[in-house]
Image (tube, rainbow, N blue to C red):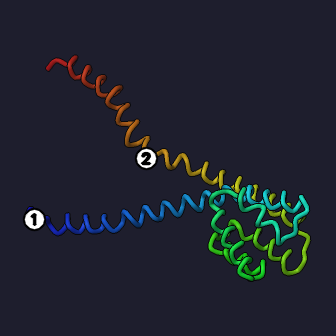
Amino acid sequence: MIGVGPVVGSALAIGAFLVPVARHRSQQMSIQSARRQSVPELVDLFRLAVGAGLSVHQVVEVVEPHAPEVFASTLTEVRRRVALGQRFGDALDAFDELGEPVRPLVASLRAAAFDGVALGPALERVAADARLQRRRWAEINARKLPVQLLFPLVLCILPAFGLLAIVPLVMTSLNSLHW
Protein backbone atom coordinates (compact mmCIF):
# COMPACT_ATOMS: atom_id res chain seq x y z
CA MET A 1 0.00 0.00 0.00
CA ILE A 2 1.27 3.42 -0.90
CA GLY A 3 1.73 5.81 2.00
CA VAL A 4 -0.01 9.15 1.75
CA GLY A 5 1.43 12.19 3.41
CA PRO A 6 -0.52 14.00 6.14
CA VAL A 7 -1.16 17.03 3.96
CA VAL A 8 -2.58 14.96 1.09
CA GLY A 9 -4.56 12.79 3.51
CA SER A 10 -6.02 15.84 5.21
CA ALA A 11 -6.91 17.39 1.86
CA LEU A 12 -8.65 14.19 0.76
CA ALA A 13 -10.56 13.94 4.04
CA ILE A 14 -11.70 17.55 3.83
CA GLY A 15 -12.68 17.06 0.19
CA ALA A 16 -14.63 13.90 1.01
CA PHE A 17 -16.55 15.86 3.63
CA LEU A 18 -17.13 19.03 1.60
CA VAL A 19 -18.31 17.47 -1.68
CA PRO A 20 -21.60 16.08 -0.26
CA VAL A 21 -22.16 19.29 1.70
CA ALA A 22 -21.64 21.41 -1.40
CA ARG A 23 -23.88 19.13 -3.47
CA HIS A 24 -26.66 19.32 -0.86
CA ARG A 25 -26.35 23.09 -0.66
CA SER A 26 -26.51 23.38 -4.43
CA GLN A 27 -29.66 21.23 -4.55
CA GLN A 28 -31.30 23.30 -1.83
CA MET A 29 -30.45 26.54 -3.63
CA SER A 30 -31.90 25.27 -6.91
CA ILE A 31 -35.11 24.13 -5.17
CA GLN A 32 -35.41 27.50 -3.43
CA SER A 33 -34.85 29.29 -6.73
CA ALA A 34 -37.52 27.17 -8.42
CA ARG A 35 -39.95 28.02 -5.61
CA ARG A 36 -39.26 31.74 -5.98
CA GLN A 37 -39.82 31.54 -9.71
CA SER A 38 -43.06 29.55 -9.34
CA VAL A 39 -44.84 31.56 -6.64
CA PRO A 40 -46.67 33.87 -9.11
CA GLU A 41 -48.08 30.85 -10.96
CA LEU A 42 -49.26 29.30 -7.69
CA VAL A 43 -50.94 32.55 -6.64
CA ASP A 44 -52.59 32.83 -10.06
CA LEU A 45 -53.97 29.30 -9.69
CA PHE A 46 -55.48 30.27 -6.33
CA ARG A 47 -56.89 33.44 -7.90
CA LEU A 48 -58.51 31.43 -10.68
CA ALA A 49 -60.04 29.00 -8.19
CA VAL A 50 -61.43 31.83 -6.05
CA GLY A 51 -62.64 33.66 -9.16
CA ALA A 52 -64.51 30.49 -10.18
CA GLY A 53 -66.51 30.78 -6.98
CA LEU A 54 -64.76 28.25 -4.77
CA SER A 55 -64.49 28.84 -1.05
CA VAL A 56 -61.18 29.13 0.73
CA HIS A 57 -61.63 25.54 1.96
CA GLN A 58 -62.09 24.16 -1.57
CA VAL A 59 -59.25 25.92 -3.38
CA VAL A 60 -56.43 23.58 -2.34
CA GLU A 61 -58.21 20.54 -3.79
CA VAL A 62 -58.59 22.30 -7.13
CA VAL A 63 -55.15 23.91 -7.21
CA GLU A 64 -53.11 20.89 -6.14
CA PRO A 65 -53.22 18.88 -9.41
CA HIS A 66 -52.23 21.94 -11.45
CA ALA A 67 -49.68 23.48 -9.08
CA PRO A 68 -45.99 23.77 -9.96
CA GLU A 69 -43.98 20.68 -9.05
CA VAL A 70 -42.09 22.34 -6.19
CA PHE A 71 -45.36 22.96 -4.30
CA ALA A 72 -47.13 19.66 -5.00
CA SER A 73 -45.96 17.83 -1.87
CA THR A 74 -46.85 20.76 0.38
CA LEU A 75 -50.35 21.06 -1.07
CA THR A 76 -50.81 17.31 -0.68
CA GLU A 77 -49.77 17.64 2.96
CA VAL A 78 -52.30 20.45 3.50
CA ARG A 79 -55.06 18.29 1.99
CA ARG A 80 -54.00 15.33 4.15
CA ARG A 81 -54.11 17.42 7.31
CA VAL A 82 -57.56 18.78 6.47
CA ALA A 83 -58.79 15.25 5.72
CA LEU A 84 -57.56 14.18 9.17
CA GLY A 85 -59.70 16.89 10.77
CA GLN A 86 -57.30 19.77 11.21
CA ARG A 87 -58.68 23.25 10.56
CA PHE A 88 -57.72 24.64 7.15
CA GLY A 89 -55.90 27.64 8.60
CA ASP A 90 -53.86 25.39 10.86
CA ALA A 91 -53.15 22.92 8.05
CA LEU A 92 -51.44 25.75 6.18
CA ASP A 93 -48.55 25.36 8.65
CA ALA A 94 -47.17 22.88 6.09
CA PHE A 95 -46.17 25.91 4.00
CA ASP A 96 -43.91 27.26 6.77
CA GLU A 97 -40.99 25.09 5.67
CA LEU A 98 -41.04 26.72 2.21
CA GLY A 99 -39.85 30.00 3.61
CA GLU A 100 -40.30 33.64 2.68
CA PRO A 101 -41.57 33.44 -0.92
CA VAL A 102 -44.93 31.90 0.04
CA ARG A 103 -45.58 33.78 3.30
CA PRO A 104 -47.86 36.45 1.77
CA LEU A 105 -49.97 33.78 0.06
CA VAL A 106 -50.29 31.75 3.24
CA ALA A 107 -51.12 34.88 5.25
CA SER A 108 -53.93 35.71 2.82
CA LEU A 109 -55.30 32.18 2.95
CA ARG A 110 -55.15 32.15 6.76
CA ALA A 111 -56.87 35.52 7.00
CA ALA A 112 -59.65 34.25 4.75
CA ALA A 113 -59.99 30.98 6.68
CA PHE A 114 -59.90 32.44 10.20
CA ASP A 115 -61.28 35.96 9.83
CA GLY A 116 -63.44 35.72 6.70
CA VAL A 117 -61.39 38.31 4.79
CA ALA A 118 -62.27 38.51 1.09
CA LEU A 119 -59.70 36.33 -0.66
CA GLY A 120 -59.94 37.71 -4.21
CA PRO A 121 -58.56 41.22 -3.59
CA ALA A 122 -55.93 39.89 -1.19
CA LEU A 123 -54.70 37.39 -3.78
CA GLU A 124 -54.54 40.12 -6.43
CA ARG A 125 -52.17 42.12 -4.22
CA VAL A 126 -50.14 39.01 -3.43
CA ALA A 127 -49.90 38.16 -7.15
CA ALA A 128 -48.70 41.66 -8.04
CA ASP A 129 -46.11 41.55 -5.25
CA ALA A 130 -44.96 38.05 -6.26
CA ARG A 131 -44.41 39.13 -9.87
CA LEU A 132 -42.52 42.20 -8.71
CA GLN A 133 -40.36 40.09 -6.41
CA ARG A 134 -39.64 37.61 -9.22
CA ARG A 135 -38.55 40.52 -11.41
CA ARG A 136 -36.24 41.81 -8.67
CA TRP A 137 -34.64 38.37 -8.29
CA ALA A 138 -34.12 38.22 -12.05
CA GLU A 139 -32.46 41.65 -11.98
CA ILE A 140 -30.23 40.59 -9.08
CA ASN A 141 -29.18 37.45 -10.98
CA ALA A 142 -28.53 39.54 -14.10
CA ARG A 143 -26.23 41.81 -12.09
CA LYS A 144 -24.31 38.78 -10.80
CA LEU A 145 -23.68 37.42 -14.30
CA PRO A 146 -20.65 39.57 -15.22
CA VAL A 147 -18.90 38.54 -12.02
CA GLN A 148 -19.67 34.88 -12.68
CA LEU A 149 -18.35 35.17 -16.24
CA LEU A 150 -15.10 36.73 -15.08
CA PHE A 151 -13.59 33.38 -14.01
CA PRO A 152 -14.03 31.64 -17.41
CA LEU A 153 -12.87 34.79 -19.16
CA VAL A 154 -9.64 35.00 -17.21
CA LEU A 155 -8.91 31.27 -17.21
CA CYS A 156 -9.94 30.31 -20.76
CA ILE A 157 -10.34 33.18 -23.17
CA LEU A 158 -7.44 35.41 -22.18
CA PRO A 159 -4.82 32.62 -22.26
CA ALA A 160 -6.14 31.49 -25.64
CA PHE A 161 -5.91 35.06 -26.90
CA GLY A 162 -2.34 35.26 -25.65
CA LEU A 163 -1.37 31.98 -27.31
CA LEU A 164 -2.99 32.83 -30.64
CA ALA A 165 -2.23 36.53 -30.94
CA ILE A 166 0.66 37.60 -28.74
CA VAL A 167 2.98 34.57 -28.68
CA PRO A 168 3.34 34.35 -32.50
CA LEU A 169 4.03 38.08 -32.63
CA VAL A 170 6.72 37.81 -29.95
CA MET A 171 8.25 34.74 -31.63
CA THR A 172 8.38 36.55 -34.98
CA SER A 173 9.98 39.55 -33.33
CA LEU A 174 12.59 37.40 -31.58
CA ASN A 175 13.42 35.56 -34.83
CA SER A 176 13.89 38.85 -36.67
CA LEU A 177 16.48 40.03 -34.14
CA HIS A 178 19.96 39.08 -35.18
CA TRP A 179 22.43 38.88 -32.38
* Figure quadrant of residue 55: bottom right
Viewer-proximal residue among 115 and 85: 85
Quarter of the figure with the C terminus:
top left
Amino acid identity at mark 2: Phe
Residue receiving disc 1: 3
First along the sequence among labels 1 and 2: 1
Amino acid identity at mark 1: Gly
Is 176 placed left or right of 3 in the picture?
A: right
Asked if 81 appears above or below 41 in the picture, the reply is below
- The image shows residue 65 at horizontal and vertical percentages of 71, 58
Residue 129 in sight: no
Residue 37 in sight: yes
* Figure quadrant of residue 94: bottom right
Asked if 88 appears above or below 38 in the picture, the reply is below
Is 43 placed left or right of 121 in the picture?
A: left
Q: Residues within 10 Å of mark 2 (few under 14, many from 20)?
A: few
Q: Residue at x 49, y 45 (%)?
A: 149
Q: Nearer the viewer, mark 1 or mark 2?
A: 1
Per the image, label 1 sits on a secondary structure element best described as loop
Residue receiving disc 2: 151
Viewer-proximal residue among 177 and 29: 29
Q: Residue at x 74, y 57 (%)?
A: 40
